[in-house]
Amino acid sequence: MTTTTLSQPAAIPARPQWPRLLMACPPQQVRQLANALALQHRVDDIQLPQSGLALLKLRDSAQGDPYFPGEIPLATARVRVSALDGAVVEGAAQLLDDRATLARAIAVIDAVIAGQLQGHEAAFELLAAGAAQLAEQAAQRRALLSATRVDFSLLGTTEDEQDD
């Protein structure tokens, strides 16, 4: 990952949110964009894409002791993208998913956006589409939550119940 801070459009969230936004998009679109970017730039794997299971480690809130409630799927990838103009940027992805190819695609897109290499505009569009999808899901969840809201203020208003 690069340490240089580059400007990005105000509507695009910070870099740690990019994988989440890309995961909200259809996987075919993410892979197609990554393949198109790989044709424009040289992509080398720093860490081969891997998928498997990882132990989820939590701490007991009372005792503070660690415990492992179970396993989660985990896919990781780390790449180095070299542009024709000599710019070299690293990208990475770590997903709660079992698709290593998707992790590699997201790592490629991460590097291109971070370095603002050729093709980053299309990646910004995909991030915006992912943000719109997540916003729609949040609105649907809020609507479901408001539809199931219960008003308890009317309970216990009779005089018989107040005597207890």
Image (cartoon, rainbow, N blue to C red):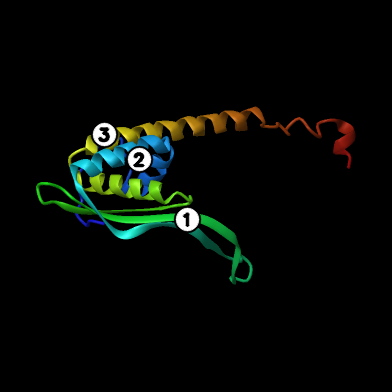
Percent of width and height locating residue 104: 35, 50
Q: Amino acid at mark 1?
A: Leu
Give the label, 2 or 1, closer to the camera.
2
Instruction: Describe the element under mark 1 as helix, strand or loop.
Output: strand
Height in image: 128 above or below 71? Answer: above
- Quadrant housing the N terminus: bottom left
Mark 1 neighbour class, 10 Å CA radius: few under 14, some 14 to 19, many 20 or more: some
Residue at 23%, 39% (x, y): give it: 120
Q: Label 2 belongs to which residue?
A: 31
Front in this rendered view, residue 70 or 59: 70
Mark 2 neighbour class, 10 Å CA radius: few under 14, some 14 to 19, many 20 or more: some
Give the label, 3 or 2, closer to the camera.
2
Residue 42 visible in the picture = yes
Residue at 22%, 56% (x, y): give it: 2
Residue 8 visible in the picture = no
Label 2, label 1: how far apart the Cα atoms are:
18 Å
Q: Label 3 belongs to which residue?
A: 122
Percent of width and height locating residue 148: 67, 31
Q: Amino acid at mark 2?
A: Arg
Image quarter for residue 133?
top left
Is residue 137 found left or right of 107 in the rendered image?
Answer: right
Label 3, label 2: how far apart the Cα atoms are:
13 Å
Mark 3 neighbour class, 10 Å CA radius: few under 14, some 14 to 19, many 20 or more: some
The disc placed on residue 74 is 1
